[in-house]
Amino acid sequence: MNEKFMAFMENKMMPIMAKVSANRYLNSIKDAFVLATPFIIIGSFALLLFNLPLQDPNNFLYFKPYDNFVKAFASDYLQIHAVSMGLMSLYVAFGVGFSLAGYYNSDKVTNGLLSLYAFLLVSAKSLATTIVGAASNLLFVEEETSIAILDGRYMDAKGLFVAIIVGILSVEISRFLVNKKLTIKLPDSVPPAISKSFEILIPVAVISIVFQIINVIIQKNMLVMLPDLIMVIFQPLLNLSDGLVSIIIILFLIHILWFCGLHGANIINPVVMVISMTNLAINQQALANGEAIPKILAGEFMNNFVYFGGSGSTLGFCIALLMVKNAHLKSIGKLAIIPGCFNINEPIMFGVPIVMNPIFAIPFILTPIINAIISYTFMKLNIVGKVVALTPWTTPPALGGFMASNLNFAAPILVICLIILDYIIYKPFLNMYIKELEKEETKS
């Protein structure tokens, strides 16, 4: 049975997944989020800094100096959140174009700006408005001053889907025109910087016309903006994705791929990141408004509450390795324990190994699913706080859960309990593997 399964995975599934892993569009989306992540993390913690659960006088955690601090500084310094999380789609739009251009050996910066331009064209209506009241003081202008503004409603996570779609299309249109020589070519004597700016003129003009026509048709006939229309189309996906069944399917796919030697997270995460970042923005808006936090699959939910030690939740397994008598496996445990505390588990994946090892297939695939079921249930019952801040994926598990859930004390307790459970799940399979190794040593 094991041999048939392994043969099926090697001959049928791995070639397909290898192609998916190499897909330029998925990789461009992944790269875009990597570029945006530092800004999103800082923006998340700026919001968190002014929304800690220390302001309610009826709560035993109430801390008056903190309450005064928030009232004095929140209105000024939440600007950090507004131009990071609040402009997430801008960074992603640029990142998609920048990364995708690299696969075509095109100018990355030019295509990144082209993608950003196309996104703003369909997502940010411009208008003039008269400033009155408190807004005049905030913007340092006199009352009744008329200023030009861009609609920023879709520059946060609500514009992510359209940022990705438009970013890809703009690069493909530009590439098509360049390949067909539909560009302005200046003599070689012209400086390269000037020549390059003229070469992109026709693609910019075509993209302007194409997207603006689409824009006008949608606005005049449907009375909505393009991001609204895209969100309506993808809303069922967002609703389904936050369900336990969807999370289990995602985890199953990631770990099947990992077991076959492919980086499952890198293959699946481009899609998951769009969903989790959109949900994170929804949670942060709820936090800022003092509302109940609605979404579970948000931000780094997987790294904070599922992947303790990396894919497969191998930190518990790593602890088990430290306790065995087998010298080889114990040495791997010693080598892997520090990286494992930061969610890096390649020493275990390829050192034990777990990859392509039938004995560890069951715990490797099922352990993160069990963690997800328990974490999801506790969050659904509001026993553990949901994710409202983006932490670096290398943040140690208990600390990551504590920070991501707005300093919810139940979160690290849950994480520690789950790591112990993971140890218990992996232990009998590790004992089985040790016996197999001893048999092989006896034969030799």
Image (cartoon, rainbow, N blue to C red):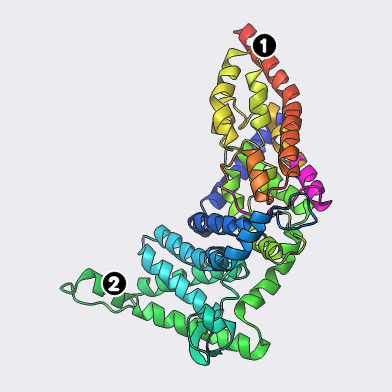
In what element is the residue under mark 2?
Answer: helix
Vertical side of 228 occupied by 242: above or below: above
- Residue 94 appears left or right of 9: left
Per the rendered image, the range of residues in magenta is 371-391
Give the distance between the C-alpha atoms of the residues marked 1 and 2, in whole angstroms. 67 Å
Q: Which mark is residue 196?
A: 2
Identity, as a three-letter code, of the amino acid under mark 1: Lys
The percent coordinates of residue 92 (x first, y second) are 51, 64
Based on the picture, tell me whether residue 378 belongs to the magenta stretch: yes
Q: Residue furthest right?
A: 381
Relative to the observer, which residue lies in front, 82 or 249?
82
Residue 26 picture quarter: bottom right
- Residue 275 appears left or right of 346: right
Are dots 1 and 2 in contact, CB under 8 Å?
Answer: no
Residue at left offset 38%, top offset 63%: 108
- Residue 208 appears left or right of 324: left
Q: Is residue 403 visible?
A: yes
Q: How would you rate the neighbour count of disc 2 (Cα within 10 Å): few for under 14, some for 14-19, many for 20 or more?
A: some
The percent coordinates of residue 123 (x first, y second) are 56, 78
Q: Is residue 24 visible?
A: no
Q: Which mark is residue 276?
A: none
Q: Which mark is residue 439?
A: 1
In what element is the residue under mark 1?
Answer: helix
Residue at left offset 70%, top offset 44%: 305
Identity, as a three-letter code, of the amino acid under mark 2: Lys
Residue at left offset 73%, top offset 43%: 409
Q: State which mark lies toward you, 1 or 2.
A: 2
